[in-house]
Image: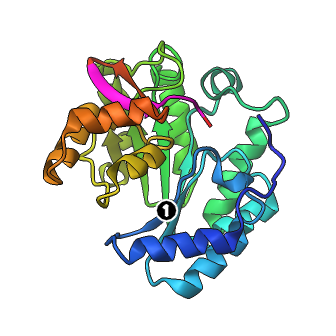
Amino acid sequence: MIIERIKFYEPEIIVREVVEALKVKNVDVVTFVPNGEPTLDVNLGKAVKLLREKIDKPIGIITNSSLIYREDVRGELLLFDIVSLKVDAVSENIWKRINRPHPKLVLSDILNGIRTFSRNYHGRLFLETMLVEGFNDSIIEAEKIATFISELRFDKAYIAAPIRPPADQYVVPPREDVIMKIYGEFVEKLGEEKVGLLIHPEKPLFGFTNDLVEEIARTIYVHPIPVDYIYKLASDRGLDGNRVIEELVSKGYAKIVRYLDKEFVVPSVRR
């Protein structure tokens, strides 16, 4: 676990691979959402600038907000057309329980960084609060989070729940009636048009090519995929879904886990 910004990939390589992918895939937005926190990459700003020279698609980023207290990080986030920030808690003890942050991170600095960024940013700003049963699903904390968000300039605040396999199996979503009470608190403070729900499995929209096994292997490191969807992907290409899954497992790419009574393909080892 680190908070020092370092180099991960050469920006030129990232840009080249994105440009090549866009030759065969039609997308609405090119999003930075790696296996980890994207703002840890010291070359993030350079990568965005180079990419903007090569493509005409909006560029977005999904970040956990942990480094937004840094001026250099806020400056690079300003380069994006769309930014999604996490606000899972505004109480120190709850934040530490649910996010398990690096010991050098300070919640008040992060919240101040979010405030500063929202004032200076002119793109589309989305906020996400992930509710976990027994952690941040009290009405008191929901009121505090909604009050904090009300101080910001943003486009939409989403209430989410863990619908894909988490790192720890004890993590589960709150009951739906609890979620709806929290939704009501958000609506009261932010307005109905400003609040959205992400509590049910989304329709998978992956743009896979025919190199199915390799592309699934890369995708599951950032987005576990339901087994039934892999069967559909395989069927659409005239392939046997069971064989695709067997190959993913035999090559050491993946394993099958059950979460909330549904089977998912996840990485065999976290990178």
Side of 249 where 241 appears, left or right: left
Q: Position of residue 153 (x, y in %)?
A: 54, 61
Q: Position of residue 57 (x, y in %)?
A: 43, 78
Side of 55 where 244 appears, left or right: left
Q: How many marks?
A: 1
Reply above or below: 219 against 61.
above
Residue at the spot x=47%, y=19% of the render?
Answer: 138
Residue at the spot x=80%, y=37% of the render?
Answer: 105
Q: Quadrant of residue 66?
A: top right
**Number of residues whose C-alpha sits closer than 10 Å to that of mark 1, classed few (under 14), some (14–19) or many (20 or more):** some
Residue at the spot x=33%, y=31% of the render?
Answer: 246
Q: Position of residue 184 (x, y in %)?
A: 33, 34
What sort of colour scheme is used for the picture?
Answer: rainbow
Side of 43 where 244 appears, left or right: left
Q: Position of residue 82 (x, y in %)?
A: 50, 66
Q: Which residue is under mark 1?
A: 31
Q: Quadrant of residue 178?
A: top left
Residue at the spot x=73%, y=69% of the render?
Answer: 75
Residue 18 in the magenta stretch? The answer is no
Q: Which contiguous range is marked in magenta?
A: 262-270
The chief SS type of the magenta part is strand
Give the structural element (helix, strand or loop) at label 1.
Answer: strand
